[in-house]
Amino acid sequence: MKNFGKLKSPKSFWLIVLILGITMMVVAGCGNDTNNENENENEEETAANGGENGIYQEDEIKIYFTEDTGTSFVKGYETREVERVTPEEAMEMFLDGPEDEDLYGIPEDVKLLGIEVEDEIAYVDFSSELLDIVLGHESEMVLVDTIVSTLTDFDGIEKVQILVEGETAESISGHVEINEPLERW
């Protein structure tokens, strides 16, 4: 075993212990500050991003509506300027209807009961009045597509499950199945 030398005095020993102790506290303290900063950043980011789901749009958003071309119904949209909007706020804009006279929205008596996002699926819950809408095949298809498109424009939402009073429904007017999560067409 090699001898690395003896300390010349007890003062040298305590000086080295003191330096090592200070170094260890600085290293440990920096690690804690970094962890605290990361935790604070994550908490601030979660709060700023619209809660636990962390899903929002900034600057502008497309709200999709039905457009009657005279020969068919197609999906149209309006671009709205926003600072920050969550999926729930976007659906409220959808329910408020279009500003453009050439676009059609959903009847005013349909209410949004809530939206939850889990595993990239938005569960959008409407009041029972949604099932009172009488639509043909094409217009029902476009209505469902406008709901799905408005929500799947958000990063983090890949599919949409339309619910009525918290329950799945077969369809809105009997033409388009909505009983499972739908992707954008």
Image (spheres, helix red, strand yellow):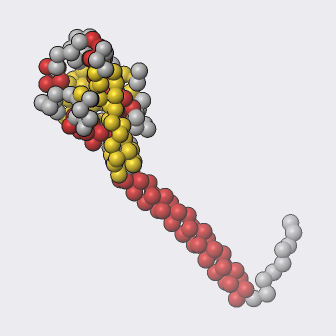
User: Which of the 4 image quarters holds residue 7?
Assistant: bottom right
Residue at x-position 55% and y-position 64%:
31
Q: Position of residue 16 (x, y in %)?
A: 70, 80
**In the figure, is residue 4 to the left or right of 119?**
right
| Quadrant the N terminus occupies | bottom right
Q: Nearer the viewer, residue 75 or 112?
A: 75
Residue at x-position 66% and y-position 79%:
19
Q: Nearer the viewer, residue 19 or 113?
A: 113
Q: Nearer the viewer, residue 117 or 94?
A: 94
Q: Position of residue 102 (x, y in %)?
A: 26, 29
Residue at x-position 34% and y-position 48%:
82
Residue 47 visible in the displayed image: yes
Up-down: is 66 above or below 177? below
Residue at x-position 68% and y-position 84%:
15
- In the image as oriented, which residue stretches furthest toward the front? 70
User: Which of the 4 image quarters holds residue 128?
Assistant: top left
Q: Position of residue 182 (x, y in %)?
A: 36, 22
Residue 165 visible in the displayed image: no
- In the image as oriented, which residue stretches furthest toward the right? 2
**In the figure, is residue 134 to the left or right of 93?**
left
| Quadrant the C terminus occupies | top left
Q: Position of residue 131 (x, y in %)?
A: 17, 20
Q: Nearer the viewer, residue 167 or 70?
A: 70
How many numbered dots are placed on residues in this image? 0
